[in-house]
Amino acid sequence: MTSAALAQLNRPAVRRSATSALSYIIAVLAAFLVTGLIILWLGQDPVTAFRSILTTSFRTSFGFVETLHKWVPISLLALGFTIPLLSGKFNIGGEGQLLVGACAAAAVGITAQGLPAVILLPAILIAGTAAGAVWAGIAAWLLVRFGVNEILTTVLLNFASFGIVDYIASEVWSDPAAGHPTTIPIADAGLLPTFGAPPVHAGVIIALVVALVAMLIVRRGTAGYELRAVGANPRAARVHGVRIAGVAAAALVVGGALGGLAGAIEVTGVYGKLIEGLQTNYLLLGIIVGLIARGNVVALPFVAFGIAVLEVGASAMQRTADVPNEMVLITEALILIFILASTVVQPRVGRRSR
Amino acid sequence: MTEMRPTTPAPLPQRAPEPALLRMHGMRKSFGTVVALDGVDFEVAPRQVHGLLGGNGAGKTTLMNVLYGLYRPDSGAVEIDGQQVHIRSPRDAIRHGVGMVHQSFLQVDTYTVTENIVLGTRLPSFPVLSLHDAHQRVREMSERFGLDVDPGVRVEDLSVGLRQRVEILKALYRGARLLVLDEPTTNLTPHEVDALFGSLRAIVEEGMSVVFITHKIRETLAVCDRLTVMRDGRLVTVVDRDAVDARRLAGLMVGELSEAGEEIRDDVAAVIGREGVEEADALTPSSATTTPRMVAQGVCADNDLGVEAVHGVSLTVHRGEILGVAGVAGNGQGELVEVLSGIRTARSGSIELDGSPMAGQPTARWLAAGVAYVPEDRTRDGILPTSSIAENIVLGAHRSPRFRRRGFIDSGAVRRTAATAMSAYSIKASSVNSPAGELSGGNIQRVILARVFGHDPNLLVLHNPTRGLDIRSTQFVYERVREAAAADAAVLLVSEDLDELMHLADRVVAVYSGRIVGEQSRGAYNPYEIGRLMTGVRGEV
């Protein structure tokens, strides 16, 4: 084949990725446009608001560190949502998995006082990860054994996890001085090391490594291949010797493990203890990131970073422009809606232009 | 089938020039970049069975779907009785007297024949549902046209052949004067085909016309008055039945091959019906041996609903042998095929491959033992639509050491294998990274074959491997299947196409209702007898 012919053949692929990048940009711009209109309607200044949202993360080093710290749970939960999604399963239990992971991390960190950091810290992280895996494992088992829908079970397990957090934080290791369900602090040796000033906790590096490993396994690994095969066409995968139930269950368990790890990092890196409500809205953000990235594990960390920037900017916006920080959630949701809409519109436009 | 040519009224051209019933002029239709119809003219005279002949992808069905209002043409004009008409929906088509019977029927299973036929029409008794008159009319029509079917029976209890009669009656009940039948003989037994042809003659004698879409030359010669041959979206020629013979039609149909200076291949010729079956027999040397490769004994298996669909089937396929399985769809052959390729677990019975027991083993073990499966539904069971061609070609072998490197897929090896396969199997795509779901049916089948033969099969199981393929791809499949047999594989070929079975297979067994009901060997094939067995009638031969 001549190189000219090759260029000719490759053009559709190039055009396809170019149009999809363009549709992302248009979706983001449109989301900001609509948000701006809403802010105007509220009688505030959209320019000030947007400046706060977009620049807070980069203007000060504090803002940047805060962004990185928010990026960790968002990207981990987004991966925990995306990996099962690649096999066609919906893990909506990231919140519960994060919380049981945080509980397990706190439990080990509080009870194992006196152990050296080299033992205690890995033990805490492993305990959190394992707890998340077990939590999602319940849903996986119910799915494989009885065919119970995983969306239902993972969501319901979120509610179960609230009870566990409440019990641990207000009964077992309650800190009576806190005035809010909170445990006593974990052993100092269990805290994640930090570096730089203002301090960045090492969870950022862990999350980075996890993201890279996930990319490698999903894209190039045999397990990732089977995962994608089950998601693409479970019947064909089964016909060709892939145990589809096993793959889906494993994907859910891995997703849960990532949620648990996120919880353990929150405890050891950010709070040093278990606090009721530490999960904030990470589940929702993780799902938004997962859906925006559309199963692309390479794009996912970057999308997660973008969302972290918006989240950090949101609280600044509330101070500077007097716009409620929930406005950012509207923007994020709009980005998602516009991107989903573009998948409907894009093929039609493409067809017409042909 | 050839003797089925009831005496026809005098051929039309001799008559005083009657205005054409249907005239389509300059029909163009493209789907994206693919031109499906490239300025086609088509004319049907009154009282005529008009054959629309061509290979898959020739544009026959597209042309008729345009006529029936299912597709809007890019350009072109349609005249009925000399009046220009604009048909925008099947409702318009029916109003203008055009009725069409598709390959798959849309029927309400739990309704009776009459209820299905009147569904969507306005009964004179409206708003009261009184089916008495309709019932009488259906009965009367079915007698008049030889479309024998009980109007009071529920359609779910009917065979495919009878359901097709219901579809034809439905069109006639709605006042069709031009009846379009899309590949109506698929899935019919030879007896049913003869009966259908008899009905078509009766319909024509009543003053209506029939367009008969087919890719089988023998059938067009048996029933048609006039023939339009299409190829690659273009009209090739229009000829009278009496002015043409099978050899010439075959040449016109597969022009692509003849023009390239190639003789029309015996395979294709046999299957589209140029040659008699007996001749084809002699053409293909068998590589069958007497060493059993796959032995199944007393195999019982359930369908997806948990109802037993295969009842105690015993089969032996020898090394180098092609064993054909004939049957009307839905008689357990789908389940049988899945059991014998390790995808469905047998409820009981034993299956041995080269002497080692396989029943109950996981699918991956079957694959490793060299069992390869070409599924009937290519897109549903055969490919990962969003994955690349390369990833599709290694599916099933992705755990073999050839494609593994330290727990990862060796993407270099995968790409090299895929590139080799793409050229060896003439897969038309921009690169090995193109998503498999964007390929045409023929190219998807080539990807599946490339995968299957890449695994060096010991047992090759194929289910309707050429359904919907164009002539080149069909030819390609036959060559690969023979190669596999010559390389000592045992081949199990399940097909609804009797011609295909008799042409390729060394032995043919007939299945009916989950049981094997008869067997014939090469040299002693009798399609009528096999057809009888397939419909559950015990033969007296």
Image: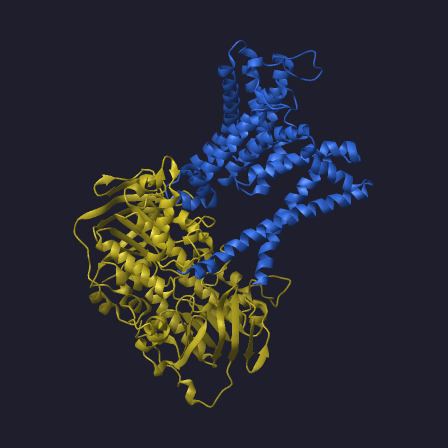
Q: In which quarter of the image is the C terminus of chain A?
A: bottom right
Name of the residue lying farthest toward the right: A43
**Viewer-proximal residue among B534 and B325:** B325
Chain letter, blue: A
* Residue B435 image offset from top left, x and y in percent: 46, 52
Is residue A7 visible in the rendered structure shown here? yes
Question: Closest to the observer: B125 or A274?
Answer: A274
Most distant residue in the top direction: A114
Looking at the image, is A346 positioned above or below residue B307? below
Q: Which residue is pictured at 43% across the width and 72% down the height?
A: B212
Which residue occupies the extreme bottom position in the image?
A: B16
Q: B283 or B307, which is in the foreground?
A: B283
Q: Is residue B224 left or right of residue A141?
A: left
Q: Residue B8, how many percent across, how many down? A: 38, 81
Count numbered badges in the picture.
0
Color theme of the render: by chain
Colour of chain B in the rendered structure image: yellow
Q: Residue furthest left?
A: B290
Is residue B111 among what the camera can see?
Answer: no
Q: Which of A58 and A354 is in front in this view?
A: A58
Residue for point 51% across, 20% down: A127
Image coordinates for residue B296, horizontal then vertical, percent = 25, 45
Relative to B365, does residue B465 appear above or below in the rendering?
below
Q: In which quarter of the image is the N terminus of chain A?
A: bottom left
Seen in the picture, residue B480 relative to A266 is either above or below; the reply is below
Q: In this view, does A98 lie to the left or right of B340?
A: right
Is the residue B440 above or below the residue A297 in the image?
below
Give x and y (percent) for residue B401. 32, 39
